[in-house]
Image (cartoon, helix red, strand yellow):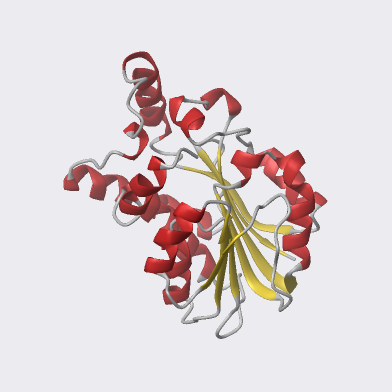
Amino acid sequence: MESEQYEIMALAEERHWWYLGLRDAIEQCLLHPSVSLPPNPRILDAGCGTGANLRFLGDLLKTDRLVGFDLSEKALEYARMKVPAAMLYQSDLRDPWIPSEPFDLVLSSDVLYVTGRESAMAGLRSLCQSLKDGGIFLWNLPAYNWMMSYHDRLVHTQERFTRSGLASLCCHLGLKCLRLSYRLHFIFPLLLVNRVFRSLFCRSRASSDLRQPSPFVNRLLFDVLHIENRLIAKGLSFPWGSSVFAVCAK
């Protein structure tokens, strides 16, 4: 990822509807009765970025047993400010160093698309081995290679994913999908129109994917995602969307 994108991300993930919607999906699914986590779970964020997701999980699950790694030292600088209690270090998803104590929850949010699945398989196996039996593995990934955009080039995207492709990967890793769905289903047509418009007229706007909309639009889009997330948590799997989301158990 281009270095200036980390500053943009660190600000946007605090209030942008996309990030709020992702964290809401995580909350709705982790708190559903079908998902069982022990008190004070040990959590690993594999590709923690600028830290908001790890901080959110610590607050949600009432734990300070937080570990995160990222390839970018710039991202980790922001993460250390947001989650000072966490153990944070520089490592690569393709060959990660992982503490020996097993984890109850591993999160990999929008990381694998940068490395591609083939180059990261050894690292993914290591992550799964670090999970306790019955532990939870959370995924969020961008959908469809045909949706590659200027922003994908900025963040060095290698591969986007499909629901069936993620299901196959999870099966290969010995994970059972408790929830597997596309996300951003209801607003997907709007995202497509926006994507086409920007590809034609805004190719030089590096931050266009993370521009903050008006408070009204930001709240409206989040409210739509909140409804969608509740349905996913109840077991509904949407047939299309711009992201693929999965909650898996070892």
- Quarter holding residue 68: bottom right
Position of residue 39 relative to residue 147, above or below, is below
Q: Is residue 93 left or right of residue 68?
A: right
* Placement of the C terminus among the 4 image quadrants: bottom right
The image quadrant that residue 124 belongs to is bottom right
The foreground one among 227 and 27 is: 27
For the residue pair 75 and 208, the one nearer the viewer reads as 75
Residue 128 left/right relative to 247? right
Residue 79 appears in the figure: yes
Residue at the top extreme of this rendering: 200
Q: Is residue 108 above or below residue 8?
A: below
Q: Residue at x 55, y 84 (%)?
A: 40
Which of the 4 quarters of the picture holds residue 244? top right
Relative image position of residue 109 (x, y in whole percent): 55, 52
Q: Is residue 237 above or below residue 56?
A: above
Q: Residue 200: horizontal and vertical position, in percent?
A: 36, 14
Could you tell whether 117 is left or right of 157 in the image? right
Residue at (36% x, 55% y) in the render: 20
Which of these two is toward me, 210 or 233?
A: 210
For the point 42% across and 71% down, the residue is 83
Looking at this view, name the residue that lies furthest to the bottom: 39
Instruction: Report x, y in % for residue 236.
Output: 55, 51
Q: Residue 5: horizontal and vertical position, in percent?
A: 40, 42
Q: Is residue 24 above or below residue 151?
A: below
Q: Residue at x 48, y 66 (%)?
A: 54
Numbered disc total: 0
Q: Looking at the image, can residue 230 be seen? A: no
